[in-house]
Image (cartoon, rainbow, N blue to C red):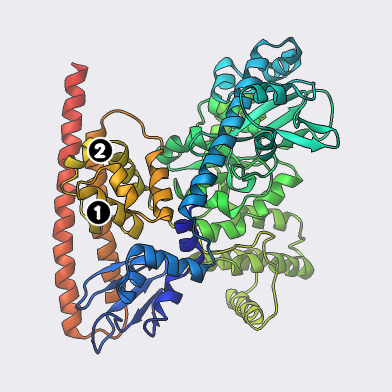
Amino acid sequence: MSAIEEIKQKLDIVEIAGRYTQLTKAGKNFKGVCPFHQEKHGSFFVFPDRQSWHCFGACSTGGDIFSLVMKKEGIEFAEALKMLAVRAGVTLPVRGRETLEKQQHARLYEANEAARDYYYNLFNTSREAEKARQYALSRGLNAQSLMDFKLGFSPSGRENLKKHLLEKGFSEKELLDAGLVIKTETGFIDRFHNRLMFPINNTAGRTTGFGGREMDGSQPKYLNSPESPVFDKSGILYGLDLAREEIRRRDQVVLVEGYMDVIIARQYGFTNTVAAMGTAISEKQIDAIKKLTRNLVLAMDADEAGEKAVLRGIEHENSLGSEIKVALMSPGLDPDAVIRQSAQDWSKAVNDAEPLVDFIISKAAAECDLSSAAGKSRLVDRILPVIAQMNNLVRQAHYLQKLSKMVNVNESRLEASLKEMKTRNQTGFQYAKPEVARTGRPLLSNQREEYCLALLIQHPQLRQKAVELETEYFSSTENALIFSLLSAGDDIETVKNKLDFATLEYMERLGTRPLIPGGLERKLEECVLLLKENYLRTLMQNQEAILSSAGLSATEKEALLEESMKIGDQLKSVFWQKSKNTERIKKENNASEK
């Protein structure tokens, strides 16, 4: 996570804006007198869901937490970044130190990738790896899967990998830092011995670590690389580098538990599958998923560990901002076994996945005697705290109704118990919470803005095709800053020299983001239209939120309605252009088929 992203995660725009003007609740948003101009009636609104602000008065402008501080303090982005970093407790990278760190990290990636190639070669050629090859065959893996995931084999010797990598110019310290060797009283030895090796990649496809399955009965059954500067197990999803485009296309991700589950799922065409590499799903992994989709299906093994992993997903629904679903496995079968047994059954299980809370209620109800008062009371005690955790009031009401019918207790009584529970919590008494607590704010990211910038950074010739792209279409200040420099005609290196190092780090990540080749001009054109549409829709939503709040004069309402009509006309123009593009693509496709 970059320093900019970490600041956005830790700080709340409502708290920051509240330091500049007094805010009052206006529906789910906040309203106050604009801190940037004199006015009698509040026209300054803060939108917590989008972590943005907008003035509908004389300013007629808005933005995110950075633009708010920049405008109020009269400072540039770099200064606002430093100020907010101090407030968030985030250490900003220093150019010299960060350059050294990047060089060190690059060496760790290179060491891991050299180890991956070494293991992969042994798996395919070594006589010692025959058992590993037979095991992979018995699990149904085909040659394409072995190649896609670069499965390998670590030999039984204690220094084979170490000697190989030392000959390639890596130092023992680099191998230790990468987690490839361990230090003993007699020196450094290989960490992995006689194991089937699963390289673990980050979203950019760089190998950050390994998982190794024993081939000789040794313990533990699975051994992972230790945490390192490039390997954060809690933040990585296995297979995400290969699945991300399909996740976007399907607007859904299926989360499983193990390496084999992911590999087999991909082999059978279910290419939107990733693994958490363990039973605990972290907030970092949820943040990575949110950048691609809000539709998450959990498909864990049907054992106690899998059930616990599902139960810990309650808090993740609030972070994800969407309902998580659960695909139920037959007892004794994990996902890869289900898929190999019947791909159709697996597809049905995912399609028929039930909402997480319904799953929890069903399991709890099965353990309670609902014909008795004690059983009903037990179910209420178990489910009411779950309902209390929900941020969405409509969902809360839905599950209160469901619980009311199950225990045959008046819904108003359950509502009273829920309110009492919240009151106890607010006064210091704690009700049952999920095991995994949230830390910081959910990370907000705009994938479309990032994709558009990645196109312009990686393909500078496209900049002249982006004449209709406006800086204001970028909701994120750092994205707007990078685009404004690019649109000024500066070359990439000149732009980089004008950026503070945290923003430079962010831009360089965009510069290495994988892009599917072909049709780049059309992709950019579509991206510009979508950014404009999103900008106009956001303006419209902001105005609707304000119109629905109290305290507006007839004149203010009339002005807002007039402005909404103008925005509506602009949206119609965008829709018309999108329909023209669609027709053009159809004609081109028909022509190519002829």
Q: Residue at x 65, y 68 (%)?
A: 384
Dot 2 amino acid type:
Pro
Q: Position of residue 48 (x, y in %)?
A: 42, 69
In front of the other: 167 or 376: 167
Residue 51 visible (yes or no): no
The C terminus sits in image quarter: top left
Q: Position of residue 426 (x, y in %)?
A: 62, 80
Task: Work out whether residue 493 or residue 556 is closer to the camera in this orientation and state it.
Answer: 493
Q: Which residue is mark 1?
A: 484
Q: Secondary structure at mark 2?
A: helix
Q: Residue 334 has which mark? A: none
Count of labels in the image? 2
Q: Residues within 10 Å of mark 1 (few under 14, many from 20)?
A: some
Q: Give the vertical position of 139 relative to 407 (above or below).
A: above
Identify the secondary structure beneath mark 1.
Answer: helix
Q: Nearer the viewer, residue 323 or 150?
A: 150
Left-right relation of 549 to 132: left
Residue type highlighted by circle 1: Ser
Q: Earlier in the sequence, mark 1 or mark 2?
A: 2
- x and y percentages locating residue 309 in the rendered image: 68, 49
Q: Which mark is residue 460?
A: 2
Look at the picture and state if 444 lies above or below 57.
above
Is residue 267 something that shows in the picture? yes
From this view, report whether residue 456 is shown above or below residue 449: above
Q: Residue at x 19, y 74 (%)?
A: 560
Report the residue at 21% width, 25% height from top. Answer: 589
Name which residue lies at 31% across and 41% down.
Answer: 457
Residue 288, image x, y percentages: 51, 48
Check contact, mark 1 vs mark 2: CB within 8 A: no
Image quarter for residue 376? Answer: bottom right
